[in-house]
Image (spheres, rainbow, N blue to C red):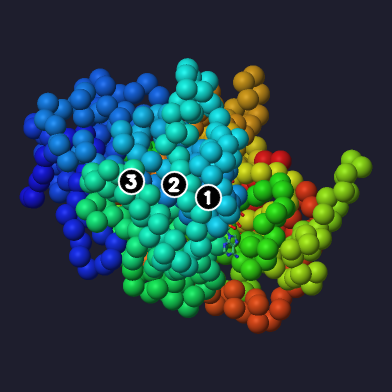
Amino acid sequence: MATHTMIVRSSSSALAASSPLKETLPLFTTRSLTFPRKSSFSRLRLRFFAEKLSQLDSSNGCASLQDSGEHLTEEHDTKEESSTLSITVVGASGDLAKKKIFPALFALFYEGCLPQDFSVFGYARTKLTHEELRVMISRTLTCRIDQRENCVDKMDQFLKRCFYHSGQYNSEDDFAELNTKLNEKEEGKLSNRLYYLSIPPNIFVDVVRCASLRASSVNGWTRVIVEKPFGRDSESSGELTRCLKQYLTEEQIFRIDHYLGKELVENLSVLRFSNLVFEPLWSRNYIRNVQLIFSEDFGTEGRGGYFDQYGIIRDIMQNHLLQILALFAMETPVSLDAEDIRSEKVKVLRSMKPLLLQDMIVGQYKGHSKGGKAYPGYTDDPTVPTNSLTPTFAAAAMFINNARWDGVPFLMKAGKALHTRGAEIRVQFRHVPGNLYKKNFATDLDKATNELVIRVQPDEGIYLRINNKVPGLGMRLDRSDLNLLYRSRYPREIPDAYERLLLDAIEGERRLFIRSDELDAAWDLFTPALKELEHKKIVPELYPYGSRGPVGAHYLASKYNVRWGDLEDA
Ligand SMILES: NC(=O)C1=CN([C@@H]2O[C@H](COP(=O)(O)OP(=O)(O)OC[C@H]3O[C@@H](n4cnc5c(N)ncnc54)[C@H](OP(=O)(O)O)[C@@H]3O)[C@@H](O)[C@H]2O)C=CC1
Ligand SMILES: O=C1O[C@H](COP(=O)(O)O)[C@@H](O)[C@H](O)[C@H]1O
């Protein structure tokens, strides 16, 4: 087996000449330990060894990279010591950059997860000075991490590493200027460059072309994180992939689905594959249905222009919920390597039947007054056409045609402007055959089935609904929860999904990013129904802002003999 030695998370590169931007496998070196050549799981490996060496940082489990070389190895990789990381946030003036990306970068810096020598560049058309960018960023940085010490100092240190370059997204010259500024900061060292495309999708290709031709690293790796949406359907997504691949190799493209970076979604495989009590039950033999539920208690506020082009199915179902479904339903991967996991997910997606129009319902929220307050309808948003048919709610029933899941409905439900905010996976189990306690449940045996709930957010937790005897002399049964509430069990704050994903991209870990064949398979499942919906101009069922959504969702579920678990809970 090919091996190479490891210095803690040091990475260097050889050149991949086939594309203007270069991506290479990180090299790992250590004197005493050898590993398979694959680069995956370097962070986990690092943690493992860091733990072994009692050097683990006391924070979120990320051993300090800023001084890891000194602590963990005797051998110094001179290349690593003289390498730099430049992270360019393209679309730095935008909502996502301010809300998520800069704060996540700061959190990584605070946690010691960024290399010693790094700089962050903001790039957008808006004219800003470095100082103005820093002021803008500083408004969204918080010392949230356990109210730890010296946060303000850390913020200052971080902000000093932040710079701004104003330019057009389709101007090679502007990117050449960015390149000059990056070179200045990199001071001739081995430079690794990460671009985060936090911009509308219609300019992805322009940016990738300009960055690749004029501002890619000449001696290290260059990677590009691409935000969703990856197209509107199979054709446009395929076209986007083809265009990106004129300038990037697949290894350089990190298609982000931030739900994959959420703690409870990450935990899904651990729960299933490392607990004997779950894996044997994970099939049609014991599971009656699986529900993937997303809800938001606010509307499209401020994002109506974007949203109206896409709708809830493309915004949430085709990516976030389907990714969770694939992780949930996949067969055991050969290993935890990114390619093994992604290959298993693709198999699930390819085993699924494309969604049929009769297996979905769509809704749109309308204005509603409650407690003297008026909540606007979707089409009241000035950026949304008044006659828009775009769904802000959808429910769908999907099936996996394989031996494990044949006949099991996977129900999805996603909506904006509902009564609550949450995301959860609900697994409803079959009835106990010949249940001795049948009579204790009156006629509603469904009420007696077990349910496993993985609450992705908020109040992250996992609970298993069981039947239990109410203490006392009689024989009364009760439904109770075996409850793992993260807040009680793990008082430490859970890192934001973007922190995990940014760190993974820096490390070259692709497990939580979407491979192009996964994307193709995902679009193939939704494109026919989306087209039909638009072609037939299906009118969405209206539901009041702040309600539980359209009743059509219940009819859909009952068609498959299912009741939505979240409503039973309420
Ligand atoms: N916001 C969110 O919560 C989420 C966003 N995303 C995705 O992330 C990406 C960025 O989102 P978000 O920050 O909300 O987007 P914004 O609409 O805020 O756009 C980001 C920046 O891009 C530039 N821009 C906006 N519209 C155009 C245009 N038509 N042509 C050229 N430049 C434009 C603007 O910068 P300037 O004018 O200074 O150049 C703007 O500040 C999108 O792909 C979005 O779908 C994904 C998940 C959640
Ligand atoms: O991708 C998206 O996700 C957000 C919800 O993300 P969350 O992490 O806050 O749950 C959603 O609001 C947005 O419409 C969508 O584009």
- Name the kind of residue labelled 2 in the image: Phe
The image's mark for residue 250 is none
Please, what is the three-letter code of the amino acid marked with disc 3?
A: Glu
Residue denoted by label 1: 92
Disc 2: residue Cβ within 8 A of ligand 1's nearest atom: no
> Measured from the top left, where is residue 101 in percent x and y?
50, 44
State the residue at coordinates (21%, 38%): 82
In percent of the image, x 59 and y 27: which residue is there? 469
The number of numbered discs placed on residues in the rendered structure image is 3
Badge 3: residue crowd in 10 Å (few <14, some 14–19, many ≥20) = few
Q: Dot 1, how many residues are within 10 Å of its Cα: few (below 14), some (14-19), or many (20+)?
A: many
Camera-side mark, 3 or 2: 3
Q: Secondary structure at mark 2?
A: strand
Question: Earlier along the polypeptide chain: callout 3 or callout 2?
Answer: 2
Residue 29 in percent (x, y) is at 13, 38
Which mark's residue is nearer the viewer, 1 or 3?
3
**Mark 1 in CB contact with mark 2 (< 8 angstroms):** yes
Q: Secondary structure at mark 3?
A: helix
Q: Residue 368 at what x, y percent from top left?
A: 86, 52
| Cα–Cα gap, marks 1 and 2 | 8 Å
- The image quadrant that residue 481 belongs to is top right
Task: Decide if ligand 1 comes within 8 Å of the CB at mark 1.
Answer: yes
Q: Which residue is mark 3?
A: 184
Sequence-earlier tag: 1 or 2: 1
